Image (cartoon, grey):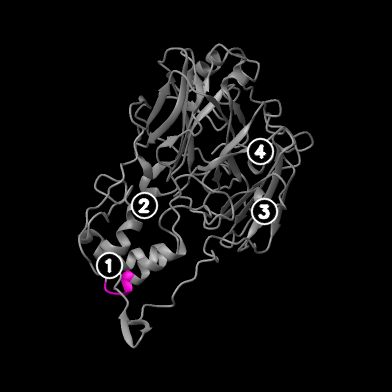
Amino acid sequence: MRGNFTLLAFLVTFSQACSSDTDPLLKSSTSGGTGGQTGQGGSTGISHQGGQSDVAGQTSGTTTAVPPVTYYGDVLPIVEQRCLRCHQHGGIAPIQFDTYAGARPNAAAMKAATASRIMPPWGATSDGTCGTFSDSLAMSDEEISTIGKWADGGALEGTSTQVSLPPLPSLGAATEYVTPLFSPVAQGGQLAQFDEYRCFMLDSGVTDPSFITGYEVVPGTPAIIHHVLGFLVDPSAPASDGSGSNLALMTKLDQASPDRDGWPCFGMAGDGVSVAAVPVTWAPGQGVMTYPGQSGVPLSSTHKLVIQVHYNLADPAQIGKTDQTKVRLRIASTVAQVGIFALPDPFLRSLSNPAGPYSLPSGQASTKFSWTATVADLGLGSVPNLMLYGIGPHMHQRGQKFHATVGDPNATASCAVDVERWDFHWQHFYFYASPRSVDATTPISVTCDYDTSADTSPVFPGWGTRNEMCLAALYFTAPLAAVSGK
């Protein structure tokens, strides 16, 4: 994901990357050694029995048998809440747990995956120690213990009951935008050895006023797609490189490769193209996105939607494949709050340092990169009544932990998100149950923890999957009337 830009609805000017002498975001550090954050696998204050016994106790000389743990009596309520949005017919999971017949053969796998917290695929600590998130899939220790006892006790069926299936995730009615059928080619070089970033321009096709309130990305060939971004570009606005209008520059970039659709775009929508907003940020594992707080990103009938697809061809078996990706936008005529995105990544931005970029030392089981920025540093210091609604961590394949605070980093209440088991293939945007009020002086601090033990040379930032990032995608809201002046 391309790092460090701030997107304030329809009024944002993108500044070119600065040197570390002038860039307030480059207040960063790297360190080796091992970390000490406590993950959701730690104590939650819940006490458990060490195992299932045949006798729970004696009462007046009477033996009371412990009822067996069964699928319908004990496991199904957990599965309904945590698993069935994916593990049902038509869901994205390859196996179904909405019937006993489907769950029983997978009992041991369910025990192992939940005990290791690989499943459900929810990376953020959700035991109340670091933020309270809406729609959390994280299981409690008690729920994990119940599934383990069920598997160990023979995966009994119990008395059949009606299964309550949650609705499949759906964006509902939406406007669809489809990229051309495209065959990516790795660009090579140190920063994108196996990768191609390609941008495709589409008309918005909406009427004014309009707001994007949610989106869904349907990758055509998931195996070769690292991420998808959607940029809103005003074609009549001046390009940031001073070469003329955005439309003239994008036309020039497109014509540079007349035999291929689109144009190369490591720099957002293309080098020099000024961007108004980035309402779409998708990575593997992310499903349907609904903006919280009755918010939306303004979309004009004159906007161009530029879709950036990052193709990764590190797997030789994927070379030569084609892709046609679909982006679905849910559009409303009015909203209460304006959505504001910021995507700071000082590690990636250090590529512009005159003295050279930051790097991660090789051969380390744990090496960290940390950075701090205030809300004003992100360009949002003058926005009134600003609320932070969510955060989306992003690293690449060496990432293993991600920790962020908002406010005093030494205060317990400042913990914003804590990912103890980063999974590159299951990335989420974590929205808070209640947003956090911030102002210009509020600091946001991030620490990314990497495993470089398999590397024999320093690891540099870059856009390629074999490079690294330390990005925090932040979603803010502000009252529509306060931002638009209406």
Tell me the residue that label 2 is attached to. 81
Circles 2 and 4, Cβ within 8 Å, touching? The answer is no
Choose mark 2 or mark 4, whichever is in front. Answer: 2
Mark with earlier residue (2, 1): 1
Q: What are the residue bounds of the magenta stretch? A: 150-154
Left or right relative to 101: residue 125: right
- Residue 362 in sight in this render: no
Left or right relative to 446: residue 208: left
Choose mark 1 or mark 4, whichever is in front. Answer: 1
Amino acid beneath label 2:
Gln
Choose mark 3 or mark 4, whichever is in front. Answer: 3
Left or right relative to 99: residue 50: right
Kindly report the distance in space between the C-alpha atoms of the residues bearing marks 3 and 4.
29 Å
Tell me the residue that label 4 is attached to. 349
Which secondary structure is most common in the magenta stretch?
Answer: helix
Circles 2 and 3, Cβ within 8 Å, touching? The answer is no
Question: Which mark, by number, is residue 70?
Answer: 1
303 or 308, which is in the foreground?
303
